[in-house]
Amino acid sequence: MNKEERINQANKNYTAENIQVLEGLEAVRRRPAMYIGDVSFKGLHHLVYEVLDNSIDEALAGYCDEIDVIINKDGSITITDNGRGIPTGQHEKENRSALEVVMTVLHAGGKFDKGSYKVSGGLHGVGVSCVNALSANLKATVYRDGKVWVQEYQTGKPDYPVKIIGDTHRSGTAITFTPDDSIFIETRFDFNTLAARLRELSFLNRGIRLSITDERETDDEGNDLFRSFLSENGLTDFINYLDETREGIMENPIHIDGEKNGVPIEISMQYNASFAENVHSYVNNISTIEGGTHLSGFRRGLTRTLKNYAERSGMLAKLKFDINGDDFREGLTAVISVKVAEPQFEGQTKTKLGNSDVMGAVEQVVSDNLSNFLEENPREAKTIVNKVVLAATARHAARKARELVQRKNVLSNSGLPGKLSDCETRDPAKAEIYLVEGDSAGGTAKQGRDRKFQAILPLRGKILNVEKAMQHKIFENEEIKNIFTAFGVSIGTEDDSKALNLDKLRYHKIIIMTDADVDGSHIATLILTFFFRYMKELIETGYVYIATPPLYLIRKNKEERYCWSEEERQAVVRELSVNGTEKGLHIQRYKGLGEMNAEQLWTTTMDPEFRTLRQVTIENATEADRVFSMLMGDEVPPRREFIELNAKYANVDV
Ligand code: 0RA
């Protein structure tokens, strides 16, 4: 046998020996959603997060301080770190390179590094082998022990055994992969989404430089898009970033760095002049949207410690009513990050921490550190307690206003707002409500709708900017009262908690329909801000949508064509025109919903058969929060800049 034949022979045997292993990865390819959540935008980006998790683990173990992501020209992606490099020695049991085992055996990564905070149950932590399984091709390059090692794969199957291709002085791992387009319905990586995650990771893991380059596109000067993040002060930097447009009432955020019962706990918090509670929690770098035991522990520790302090200092003596948990969190921005060895994730989206021992650990750490802080900083302690008393007073006033609203509603016939044109069905799962900008468009929608399942609630002009208003003003606002009563939900009737009771929600599709212009999108943003702050559960459950009315109607004789974008308009003009001119075509630009008649509005925007609804989701809760406070807050300059940079709702993916 010559050399080439020997290699061919080796490769053949090699594939035969590994059938067992390939079965494992086949399972991932057969049911990808089970491993990465979905096969669209979210799942696609999870592939990158999975590789990043491994690099971050190296950093947490103290071996890596630099991670680079490159979106390559061909749409593939490369993640490079300067860690130890995936081990390349012979794996005893498997009788092949450990690198190959890590890349081709499900969950093999975890075997090597006990004691680090790997994630199980959540969407991350499925192992790089899953990324390999779901990639059309992947190349792993390892810099280790003075050598450069490589192996390439197609749909998870190695092309050849691990080989050395050169010498090196560096150490680390580089993974390049192309997601398999026979599995993913979305294969284009989004620069902003990845950059936001890298920024978040840099705050959660201080001292690691995380960079991203997009080689597919260039900026106005012909440079690649590039962002680089490095946080020295971790969560404190995170708080200052989140509160960029808010005014803090303390000089610096309170920072807690502790450990209890083997649970590392890091917290940073600052009170600001706003009324929103803005608390974000993480477990092993994963955003726990639904909260869990770590968040409960934080709340208990905060309430208990502040209440004790306030009582002992006599500042509550004149208060005629009770203060409750919410009062301690009004205008609070906080980030809680814990590391849990074997996290149990629960809840609808598997983002709620279930480990019961974590609650006590966090409560104790918060309580110890916060007590110390209050004792050592009496001036700031007083500022905080004053704010809490103010919140309790305002809540009391808000409750009175709310009770008034609810009493009034009982008196009217149906208990529903007079402006609501309700639908016939009483089945929330089938019922839809359109929130329509303006009485006139509301009238058209009412004529055009299918009354069996579509309700219409017209909203007059701009609704209140909840970002700037106090709670009792919000509940006194006519439009907001109408929304609450039409939906059938109430907040805080019994225990004053802000949790929304969705059991009585009358519609499972809530559709915001505004003009397709700047004013319309401003109104949609106001409504979304209100939902985000006061009915977040609606967005989390996926009940909120945005209608998409067309921008143009092009007519040629009897033929009518609607267009939703400028590109579409040009394409239709090209198609219908005789020799490239617009002659003979009648092009109408819709400036508002009011320019359509009832039938047009139905066919283009409301008929479930033809309409497109954009579902509102919260991809990244911290980014969404920042966007809303920026769009709706007091400080105008960053808002203008933001709107110029991002015509759309950045991470509020609509
Ligand atoms: C298995 C074991 C060790 C590290 C890794 C995997 C590892 C995986 C990836 C993926 C991207 N970058 C990575 N860096 C490391 C432990 C290493 C050792 O014990 O030497």
Image: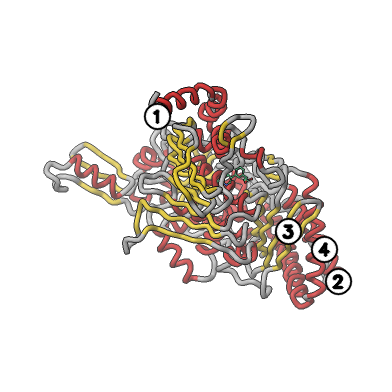
Give the mark, 1 or 2, whose residue is nearer the N terminus. 1
Q: Nearer the viewer, residue 555 or 649?
A: 649
**In-image side of 62 versus 441 (left or right):** right
The residue carrying mark 4 is 368
Secondary structure of the residue carrying numbered label 3: helix
Residue drawn at the location 16% of the way across and 42% of the way down:
577
Q: What number is the disc on residue 3? A: 1
Residue 426 x/y as whole percent: 59, 34
- Which is more foreground, mark 3 or mark 1? 1
State the separation of the CA atoms marked 4 and 1.
69 Å
Q: In the image shown, does 147 or 564 lie closer to the viewer? A: 147
Q: Which mark is residue 317?
A: 2
| Quarter in which the N terminus is drawn | top left
| Residue to which mark 3 is pinned | 326
Which of the 4 image quarters holds residue 182?
A: top left
Tag 4 and tag 2, C-beta contact below 8 Å: no
Indicate left or right for 549 with 477 as reference. left
Would you say residue 294 is visible in this rendering? Answer: yes
Marks 4, 1: nearer the viewer: 1
